[in-house]
Amino acid sequence: MPVPTPHIEAKKGEIARNVLMPGDPLRAKYVAEHFLEDARLVNQVRNVYAYTGTYKGKELTVMASGMGMPSIGIYSYELYKFYDVDNIIRIGSAGAYTDRLAVYDVVLADSAWSQSSFAKVQNGCMDDVLYPSESLNTRILDAAHCLQIPLKTARIHSSDVFYTEDNVDGYKEIIKKHQCECVEMESFALFHNAKLLGKNAACLLTISDSFVTHEELSSLARQESFENMMKIALEAC
Ligand SMILES: O=P(O)(O)O[C@H]1O[C@H](CO)[C@@H](O)[C@H]1O
Ligand SMILES: O=c1cc[nH]c(=O)[nH]1
């Protein structure tokens, strides 16, 4: 498919090979305005902002994914396939399932478990656990080490549903059965698309709320206060 696509108006060459991808378009804007030099807006279709600029002299793009697997499924596919993107690092928020993870902790996904039909519908893949790129995860761990920012690794739950009822497994059952320590809503689809297209994906998360303590950050904090995660992701690029 030629670019622009139905969802991205950037021209070929306006998107860097390394992309940071928060769910929230205003978190993308925050990263661009606070960390990138010469950032220019290259996509605003559906208000899903993408900015391309440089960080320490290296070109990179920060682009929102929107919420959920169908949404990141579209953007990551188009970026990898039509814009020649090599690496996508998701920079998201997550709810903690265990007291090992506190609000503001930064977590690196070592795997994503999901009940989602995304992979099955996309190409018949029946796996319910998908993995990030080992090399990208190594770069992220090295970056966190250099910056002296604590980073915890965990299996994450990639869920299609934010609000669930009591008649389905809650977080305690999900920890027991699937060893997931926190929940978010996109990584499983991102990891699937990366594997499908021979590209790299990783997922960094900041804990925004806890199922254990019931603490919760505001929408503004989720937009702007995840600087440790942002710095690790930028440095890893
Ligand atoms: O903060 P982001 O990156 O959007 O990530 C998390 O926040 C949203 C739900 O509030 C979902 O997209 C979930 O994955
Ligand atoms: O998907 C998500 C993201 C943050 N917090 C949650 O509880 N769920």
Image (cartoon, grey):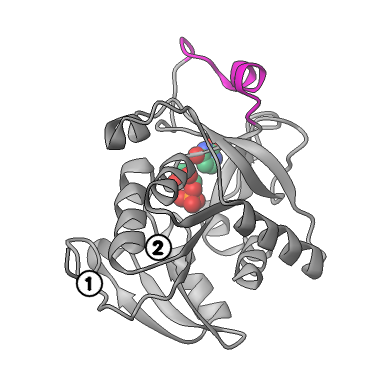
- The residue under label 2 is which amino acid type? Pro
Can you identify the residue that label 1 sits on? 9
Disc number for residue 165: none
Q: Residue at x 38, y 42 (%)?
A: 68
- The residue under label 1 is which amino acid type? Glu
Q: In the figure, 118 relative to 35: above or below?
A: above
Q: Quadrant of residue 78?
A: bottom left
Q: In the figure, 13 relative to 6: above or below?
A: below
Position in image of residue 114 (x %, y %): 48, 29
Position in image of residue 222 (x %, y %): 55, 55
Q: 199 or 144, which lies in front? A: 199
Q: Residue at x 29, y 37 (%)?
A: 122
Determine whether, in the image, residue 208 is placed left or right of residue 14. right
Can you identify the residue that label 2 sits on? 25
- Which residues lie in the magenta part? 166-180
Position in image of residue 121 (x %, y %): 28, 32
